[in-house]
Image (cartoon, rainbow, N blue to C red):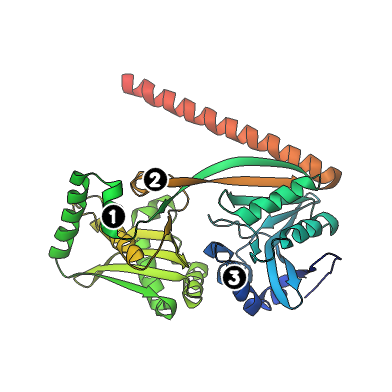
Amino acid sequence: MNKKEIECKLHCKIIRGIDGVTGLSEEWDSLFKRAHKAPPYFSRAWVQTFMTENHVNGKPLLITVWSDSKLVALLPLTICSYLGIKLAKVAPTTILCYTGILVDPDYHEAIHAVAEVLKQEKIAHIFYNKYLSSLDEPTNELTAELIRHNSVYKRWKRRTCPWTILEPSFDQVLNSRRTGEQRRWLLRKERRIFKSGDVKVVRYNGSQITPEITARIAAIQADSWVKAEGKAVLSQTFYQKLLVEMGKAGLGYVWLMTKNGDDVAFIYALRVNDRLYPKWMSYRQKYGTSSSLSYGTVLYMQMVRDACNEGINILDLGFGQDSWKQLWTTDNQTIDMFISGRGFIGYSSAFLCGVLLRCAKYKWSLHKRVTKFRTADKTKQ
């Protein structure tokens, strides 16, 4: 484990390599519990699994801040090089999830300490955060600190992610989001499903999320519509380990629906305190759109009902603006990409990244317009 210290109000260390990452397990878990608003994607179980299983692009590096022997801030990075330009990316970037800094709320000054490390230690020419949430106050403060340190920067709005504030009861949720006719339709669907056979919904969490359970939900995903899109990934060894590790950490929850002994649908969600993050969900094709019973919708209703019963206040619906999400949404957050550069190489690289991204955005916009025009032309013919 390679460590460096800088002189600042708090004690800062740069930790490189897998051995250093795994050596922080206890301190990392403790910090995550204190940072009560941090999403599950900042937890040790999530980030460390990506790093130890080599599911990151680059070499692992942690910027840590300590108060005596107490870890008070942690920024996980991966370092890679392109044509001699060193890039520090907030980890992980190989999956859609929020990325940022983990900070003890009682040590807000630790954010400034991390910015000083990024400025002074020459870790990389470019600092890159691919999935920066507008709701992540500490990470947004870190970007502001980097800008105040005279770094050239670019920031782009990339995505919009919906979320919702849940009422205390499921009935109140339905009343606030559905018309009377829609409520009756949903509840009628639910009754029909549970009368159509021996239908059960079982929830698993913690150590109950075993390799057997993760294999079952992976089999459902592999037999669902996401397979055609190349997104049926849960059967891969890495994801199987990730699902189990998040369960061990007490952050993973599985809702599994069966009918007459057959696995029908699942939801794998992450929970931190009073916030729930549904991450993966699928249903077998034979129970899908060709069926009038809407198994996936009913399973999602059961998850929301359980969330209300257990005092969940925030339901984070994740990446994407799917139409079904809008039925549950009360608000949105934006997901930005942030790049800052240091020195002449960093400045030039950040500027070039901005130009390339604008070109890519223009090319994609032009492609959509041409496709729309061709489709309209064929329709007329």
Could you tell me residue 192's position as x and y percent? 14, 58
Label 2 vs label 3, nearer the camera: 3
Q: Which residue is mark 1?
A: 172
* Any part of residue 284 in sight: no
Instruction: Give residue 319's position: percent from left, percent from top.
Output: 48, 50
Q: Which of 165 and 149 lies nearest the eye of the viewer?
A: 165
Numbered disc 3: secondary structure: helix
Amino acid at the residue labelled 1:
Gln
Q: Is residue 44 left or right of residue 219?
A: right
Q: For the residues marked 2 and 1, what is the alpha-carbon distance in whole angstroms?
A: 23 Å
Cα separation between marks 3 and 1: 31 Å
Badge 3: few (under 14), some or many (20 or more) residues near its Cα, within 10 Å? some
Q: Quadrant of the N terminus?
A: bottom right
Q: Does residue 16 lie above or below 125 as drawn?
A: below
Label 2, secondary structure: give it.
loop
Q: Amino acid at mark 3?
A: Arg
- Quadrant including the C terminus: top left
Q: Are marks 2 and 3 in contact (CB under 8 Å)?
A: no
Left or right of residue 107: residue 211: left
Q: Earlier in the sequence, mark 2 or mark 3?
A: 3
Residue at coordinates 20% horizontally, 53% vertically from top-left? Answer: 291
Mark 2 vs mark 1, foreground winner is 1
Residue 322 badge: 2
The CA span between labels 2 and 3 is 33 Å
Q: Evaluate if marks 3 and 1 touch, with contact meaning CB atoms under 8 Å apart.
A: no
Q: Which of the 4 image quarters holds residue 74?
A: bottom right
